[in-house]
Image (tube, grey):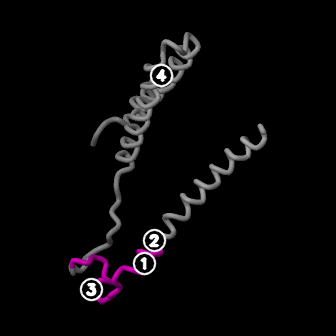
Amino acid sequence: MELNVYQNNYLIVFVFLCLGVLLPVVALYFGKLLRPNNPSDEKNTTYESGIEPFHDSRVQFNVRYYIFALMFVIFDVETVFLYPWAVAYDKLGIFALVEMLIFVAMLLLGLVYAWKKKVLRWI
């Protein structure tokens, strides 16, 4: 009986995986069938508003903006890891405290490195 329960768990995961793939595919297919399709020269231009593009649409950005945004995401994810740890701190004990201190120290080391490289300066 134990093996049957174990196989049922995989069956449930497989059913949800199939539904997760099948439902969006069916929805997109029905959307393609039901939408109006009236292509014209104006709709096939770069901008549907009718404005003619007057130069290349690719603009070069400074990579510093992307690094700044990536740093924000890293420290935002840090709070996601810290919150559950803080809530369950009483049950986790000293080992979890040491692990979290190592985690925060590594993040602080990365922040100091980014600060030394002047990544955090907004230009």
Q: Which residue bears the numbered disc 1?
A: 32
Q: Which mark is residue 42?
A: 3
Instruction: Give the Cα separation between the discs numbered 3 and 4.
Output: 55 Å
Disc 3 to disc 2, how far (Cα)?
25 Å
Mark whose residue sits in front, 3 or 2: 2
Image point (39%, 49%), residue name:
63
Residue 81 falls left or right of residue 36: right
Rendered position, 59 above or below 2: below
Q: Which numbered disc, 4 or 1, marks the residue closer to the eye?
A: 1
Q: Secondary structure at mark 3?
A: loop
Location of the C terminus (image quadrant): top left
Find disc 4 in the rendering and name its residue: 85
Q: Earlier in the sequence, mark 3 or mark 1?
A: 1
> Which secondary structure, mark 4?
helix
At x 34%, y 46%, the residue is 65
Say above or below: 7 vs 18.
Answer: above
Q: Earlier in the sequence, mark 2 or mark 4?
A: 2
Q: Earlier in the sequence, mark 3 or mark 2?
A: 2
Amino acid carrying mark 3 in the image: Glu
Q: Per the image, is 4 magenta?
A: no
Between disc 3 and disc 4, the foreground one is 4
Q: Looking at numbered disc 2 in the image, what kind of residue is underneath it?
A: Leu
SS of the residue under disc 2: helix
In magenta, the rendered stretch is: 28-49
Amino acid type indicated by mark 4: Trp
Q: In what quadrant of the picture does the N terminus appear? A: top right
CA distance separating discs 2 and 1: 6 Å
Of label 3 and label 4, which has the lower sequence position? Answer: 3
